[in-house]
Amino acid sequence: MMPEVSIRIGERLFKVSCQDGEEAALHQAAGLLNTEAKTLEGQSRRLPEAQMLLMAGLMLADKHVAAAGNNRQLEETVARQEARIKDLESQVEQGRMRAAPSKDKVSEALARIAERAEALAESAEKMSGARA
């Protein structure tokens, strides 16, 4: 059996059935609708109940549409920012690759250093042999 909840919109009390566990959400939604209904009551002449509920529902729907549009804009902004971050990360990585010497260059430099060290060692041996 579905729970029955009493909600107040404007001056009228409504009994509404809902799924078990949805009572709090129903009260929250009714509170939003009631807030819009009170706004209408304060702004205009006495509206028939059906028209007041329709207008309050339309006001809430308008807010929902605006919020959905804002959400879409935020999602697009986040997507652009994420793409920008990936681009910047790629640029940083490319900079690191250019800044770091390649393994071939390091190997060549080490080979030249080894050749010079061997030449110096030979030169030192010759000089020590000539003195002896």
Image: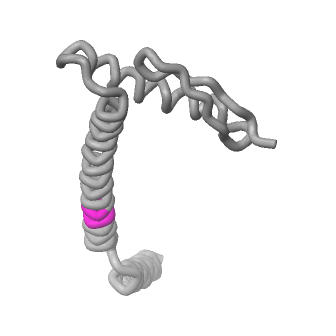
Hey, which quadrant is residue 92 in on the image?
Answer: bottom left
Q: Residue at x 29, y 34 (%)?
A: 51
User: Which quarter of the rendered picture does the N terminus lie within?
Assistant: top right
Q: Position of residue 8 (x, y in %)?
A: 51, 20
Residue extent of the magenta highlight: 83-88
In this view, the residue in front, 22 or 127, is: 22
Q: How is the image coloured?
A: one colour
Q: Pick out the residue farthest to the front.
A: 48
80 in relation to 7, above or below: below
Q: Position of residue 91 (x, y in %)?
A: 25, 66
**Is residue 36 at least partly visible in the picture?**
yes
Q: Position of residue 79 (x, y in %)?
A: 31, 60
Exactly how many numbered labels are in the figure? 0
In this view, the residue in front, 132 or 123, is: 123
Q: Residue at x 33, y 17 (%)?
A: 38
Q: Is residue 27 magenta?
A: no
Hey, which quadrant is residue 36 in on the image?
Answer: top left
126 in relation to 46, above or below: below
Hey, which quadrant is residue 46 in on the image?
Answer: top left
Answer with left or right where residue 11 lies relative to residue 56. right
In this view, the residue in front, 25 or 132, is: 25
**Is residue 92 at least partly visible in the picture?**
no
Q: Position of residue 50 (x, y in %)?
A: 35, 34
Q: Residue at x 72, y 37 (%)?
A: 21
Q: Pick out the residue farthest to the right.
A: 1
Name the dominant secondary structure of the magenta segment: helix
